[in-house]
Amino acid sequence: KLHSVRHSWGTILGILAISQEPHLYKCCFGVSQIANVADSEKLSYMKVLEKAKQIGNDKVYIKLSKIGPPPWNNLKDNRIQQKHIEMFGGRITRDGKMTFRIIKGLLLSGEYTIPDVVRYFKGLNFSMECLEDEVMKIDLQNQVKSVDIPIYFLMGKHDLISPFEPAKQFFNKIKAPEKQWIWFKNSAHTPTFEEEEKFIKILRKIIGPDTI
């Protein structure tokens, strides 16, 4: 049996997988768990807009007000939102350097060329465009009422990509033999990297020290 460790939109697939084929899994970890993409995006927009207002950044506030809340009809508006999420330390990592780390890691691996890196990011955009309509319809709270294995949600306190509230509502309602909500107080959207030591410690505690 497998220990399922999923991140971001992969956590949606994780919950759907264990609800449909629980016999294949021992437990499921949802890192930056997402339960409802549409609700998360709207809440993300409102939080970033409010942050701009609080610090008196009129330029950002006006720009965000101009595009309005999601859903958007193009990726340009989404990129504007993502840019300002990063400005406020709530995107992939709080320091905003994760994209650089990904590129550096790919190039230093010896298995990727510069054109490969370009194709990697093009692939991300391609996936977003192709899957957006389907993903926006997902609402785990209504789709999955219970699971038969333990679940653990590992959440970054500063995450503005997928704010915690929709996932928390889902967590409170779903029935499971065991469930834990675990905060990473110094992380945004990737506590696996931002608080790596804590993340590994939690996995070893739950699934066994010899597993990792």
Image (cartoon, rainbow, N blue to C red):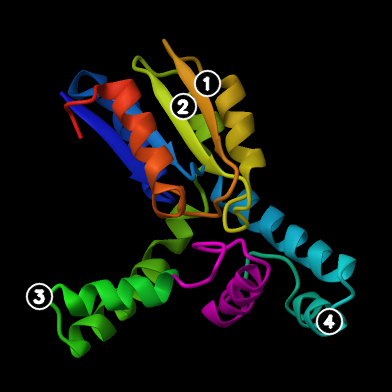
- Name the residue that disc number 4 marks: 62
- Kindly report the distance in space between the C-alpha atoms of the residues bearing marks 1 and 3: 42 Å
Vertical placement of residue 111 versus 46, above or below: below
Q: Residues within 10 Å of mark 4 (few under 14, many from 20)?
A: some
Q: CA distance from mark 2 to mark 3?
A: 39 Å
> Residue 143 at what x, y percent from top left?
48, 31
Residue at image point 67% right, 65% down? 70
Most foreground residue, 112 or 161: 112
Residue range of the region highlighted in magenta in the rendering: 73-97
State the residue position of label 1: 174
Please identify the quarter of the rendering in which residue 21 is found.
top left
Q: Residue 60 in the image: x percent, y percent?
A: 78, 80
Q: Residue 170: x, y in percent? A: 57, 30
Mark carried by residue 111 = 3
Q: Name the residue beneath numbered marker 2.
A: 144
Q: Sequence-wise, which precedes: disc 3 or disc 4?
A: 4
Report the number of discs. Answer: 4
Tell me the CA gap for discs 2 and 4. 39 Å
- Does the magenta portion include 81? yes
Label whose residue precedes the other's in the sequence (1 or 3): 3
Q: Amino acid at mark 1?
A: Ile
Q: Are marks 2 and 1 in contact (CB under 8 Å)?
A: yes
- Three-letter amino acid code of the residue under disc 4: Ile
Is residue 119 visible in the rendered structure shown here? Answer: yes
